[in-house]
Every structure is written in structure tokens, then in C-alpha cells.
Amino acid sequence: AIDRTLRLEEENEKPQGDEALNKLFQQIYANANEDTRRAMIKSMQTSGGTVLSTNWDEVSKTDYEKERQAPKGMEWKNYEGKKLPMKEDD
């Protein structure tokens, strides 16, 4: 009875902040088709975590490593601290 009550409370509990965002991404990924999952994985990994796309047609043609773009005011560097080429700001 206690386990059931706790489980119902967890299901009814609304996540907040980063937890809510992570849950949303998990739901999108879990309910997605194979192309969408592939797009999400490739875009996140090859962009260094700056892009998350669900459009495989776009992701399959984009080279995020060549078109890398850091957040405004930051720059890409490798592990040795050398600056890496980036796409010019628009």
C-alpha cells in the first residue's frame, strides 16, 4: 500500500527546471522513430552539446564540427587549449 501510494505521488509530481527539461527530452527520444533518435544523438555529440535537432534530413547533411559555433562571448578550444576554427557569427 505504501509503495503504491509513493508511486502515485511520483507520477503526479511535476518536475521543475533542469529536471523538467531532461524529462521532456527523454520523452521525445523514447517516443521518436529511428531517424529522430539518430538526429538527436549525432547533433548533440558532433556539436559539442550546443545543438539538439530532431530533423535527420538536416542533421545528416550538416557537419557540426566544421560549422562549430560557441555561445556568444566564448570560443572553442581543444583539450590542449588551442583555439579551434568556428563558424563566423551572423
Image: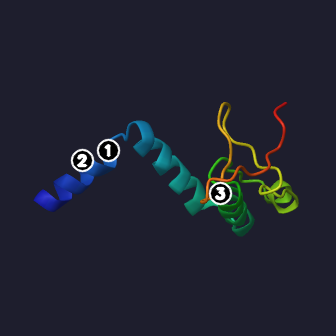
Q: Residue furthest bottom?
A: 34
**In terms of depth relative to the viewer, which is nearer, 29 or 63?**
63
Q: CA distance from mark 2 to mark 3?
A: 45 Å
What residue sits right under mark 1 in the picture? 12
Whether residue 1 sits left or right of residue 78 in the image: it is: left
Q: Find the distance from the CA under tag 1 to the CA under tag 3.
A: 44 Å
State the residue in front, 13 or 51.
51
Pinpoint residue 20: horizontal percent, then vertical percent: 44, 42
Kindly indicate whether the residue at mark 3 contacts the one at mark 1 (C-beta within 8 angstroms).
Answer: no
Q: Which mark is residue 55?
A: none
Contact? badges 2 and 3 (CB < 8 Å):
no
Q: Nearer the viewer, residue 37 or 32?
A: 37
Quick one: SS at disc 1?
Answer: helix
| Residue nearest the viewer, comparing 84 with 27 | 84
Residue at far left of view: 2
Work out whether residue 1 can be spotted: no
Q: Residue drawn at (74%, 52%), measured in percent from left and top?
A: 84
Seen at 83% across and 55% down, the residue is 66
Residue 78: numbered disc? 3
Q: How is the image coloured?
A: rainbow
**Residue that mark 2 sits on:** 9
